[in-house]
């Protein structure tokens, strides 16, 4: 099965990289969204964070537009590569790290903690390297009666919010067909590609790892299903098992496209708008991606396929648990521009899942029956007649109780509004 997955990844990546090599620049007015929802949801936080990050990068770019002097093309190329490497180290990577750490801590851990009525005593977002040690922390006053499911969601809220952020970027890249060069480090940092390539599994006997996002997840998920007195060497999901499961992310061909585009087309060739191609069959373009997440029920794997036609863009996905402790799965479909008039454009998303009940205590209910749930989300964009630079956005959604990535755990009606700036 693993060999089939790697072969599938190799064929798709080679096909897409050939497309990337012959890309042309694409110029059009860009959109920057600033939105508010209640209750807060992670994807809106990610949209706001990324809009702010892009605006900052756009204006920082103005200081680096002057071409190096001299008539020697080799000299210009060498100076250009050197300049881009310096800018990468001193600006691009630090700005990307601030964006993802802010998303991780504020719209991840802190958002989940506030959802469960826990106090926030402090949030630290450290200066990124090379200016500081990087990273961040959220200090939470957890209630004594907090259930183990909510403990898990607070601890995994940071990685959860980064998954939401990376999915928003994937959709943006594929829908418009290209990425700005400074968006690609943000995408790769969200996936934490360096940890998969160079990191270790982690030692649960190490106090620092035990209090990390993954360490707390491992301890809590095993305690929930096996009991609080279970020895570490008896865990069904340990640090090595989790590391292997996380590598499912690496089947995603977007990772190789992003790395090739950034290193070859931007650093070496100086291209700033980088093509993100899709595979065409007939009149439909498609692009598959993969994802992995730590849920209150165990490890969960996502397979997502983006689809684009001349009139619409959307995606379908399936998610399935690994059945280490229990069975759970879900499906979803999203369609942009599903309905359009001269007054508004309507996007719609529907999710369906089958999961065990939410645990209100510290131990999972034995032989708990699976139940169904759903989410429906409508996103409307209304152009302003008096301004070609501003659109109004309105969001309305409803979900039943259970876990859906990026959404509140409880049954909730949520909505929001905001503005799309176009310039």
Image (cartoon, grey):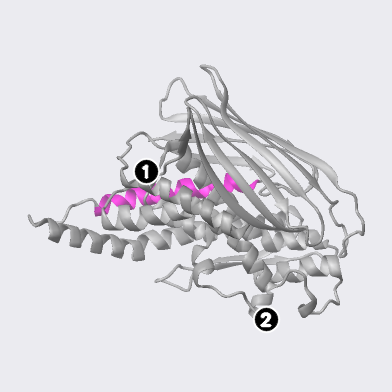
Residue pictured at 32% horizontal, 56% vertical: 264
Tag 1 and tag 2, C-beta contact below 8 Å: no
The span picked out in magenta is: 41-64
How far from the left and from the top, in percent, is residue 339?
58, 22
Residue 152 visible: yes
Instruction: Let me know if residue 52 is in the magenta part.
Output: yes
Q: Secondary structure of the magenta portion, mostly?
A: helix
Which SS class for mark 1?
helix
Give how far apart the Cα atoms at labels 1 and 2 are. Answer: 47 Å
User: Which quadrant is the C terminus positioned in?
Assistant: top left
Instruction: Let me know if residue 307 is in the magenta part.
Output: no
Residue pictured at 91% horizontal, 53% vertical: 368
- Which is nearer the eye, 138 or 209? 209
- Which is nearer the eye, 98 or 294? 294
Up the image or down, 142 lies above or below 209; here it is above
How far from the left and from the top, in percent, is residue 241?
68, 69
Residue farthest top in this picture: 342
Residue pictured at 62% horizontal, 68% vertical: 243
- Which is nearer the eye, 39 or 204? 204
The part of the image, by quadrant, that contains residue 248 is bottom right
Nearest to N terminus: mark 1 or mark 2: 1
Up the image or down, 416 lies above or below 64; here it is above
- Residue 19 got which mark? 1
Q: Please tell me how many numbered marks the rendered image carries.
A: 2
Residue farthest left in this picture: 71
Give the labeled residue for mark 2: 207
The part of the image, by quadrant, that contains residue 81 is bottom left
Left or right: 134, with 417 as reference point: left
Left or right: 181, with 148 as reference point: left
């Amino acid at each position: 099965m693993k060999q089939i997955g790697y072969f599938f990844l190799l064929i798709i990546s080679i096909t897409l990289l050939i497309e990337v090599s012959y890309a042309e620049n694409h110029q059009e007015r860009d959109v920057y969204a600033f939105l508010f929802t209640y209750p807060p949801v992670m994807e809106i936080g990610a949209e706001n964070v990324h809009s702010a990050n892009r605006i900052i990068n756009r204006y920082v770019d103005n200081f680096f537009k002057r071409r190096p002097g001299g008539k020697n093309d080799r000299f210009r190329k060498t100076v250009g590569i050197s300049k881009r490497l310096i800018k990468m180290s001193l600006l691009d990577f630090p700005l990307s790290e601030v964006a993802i750490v802010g998303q991780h801590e504020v719209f991840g851990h802190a958002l989940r903690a506030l959802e469960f009525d826990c106090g926030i005593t402090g949030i630290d977002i450290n200066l990124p390297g090379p200016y500081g040690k990087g990273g961040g922390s959220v200090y939470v006053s957890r209630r004594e009666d907090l259930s183990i499911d909510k403990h898990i969601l607070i601890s995994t809220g940071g990685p959860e919010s980064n998954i939401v952020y990376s999915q928003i970027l994937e959709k943006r890249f594929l829908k418009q067909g290209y990425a700005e060069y400074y968006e690609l480090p943000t995408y790769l940092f969200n996936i934490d590609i360096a940890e998969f390539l160079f990191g270790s599994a982690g030692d649960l006997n190490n106090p620092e790892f035990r209090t990390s996002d993954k360490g707390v997840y491992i301890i809590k998920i095993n305690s929930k299903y096996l009991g609080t007195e279970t020895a570490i060497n008896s865990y069904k999901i340990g640090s090595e098992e989790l590391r292997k499961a996380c590598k499912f992310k690496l089947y995603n061909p977007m990772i190789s496209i992003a790395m090739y585009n950034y290193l070859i087309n931007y650093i070496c060739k100086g291209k700033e708008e980088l093509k993100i191609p899709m595979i065409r069959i007939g009149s439909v373009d498609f692009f598959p991606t993969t994802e992995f997440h730590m849920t209150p029920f165990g490890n969960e794997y996502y397979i997502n396929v983006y689809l684009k036609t001349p009139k619409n863009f959307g995606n379908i996905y399936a998610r399935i648990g690994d059945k280490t402790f229990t069975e759970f799965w879900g499906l979803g479909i999203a369609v942009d521009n599903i309905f359009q008039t001269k007054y508004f454009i309507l996007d719609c998303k529907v999710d369906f899942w089958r999961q065990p009940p939410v645990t209100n205590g510290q131990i999972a209910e034995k032989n708990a029956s699976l139940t169904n749930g759903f989410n429906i989300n409508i996103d409307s964009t209304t152009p302003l007649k008096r301004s070609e630079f501003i659109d109004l956005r309105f969001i309305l959604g409803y979900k039943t109780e259970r876990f859906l990535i990026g959404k509140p755990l409880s049954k909730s009606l949520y909505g929001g509004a905001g503005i799309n700036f176009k310039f």
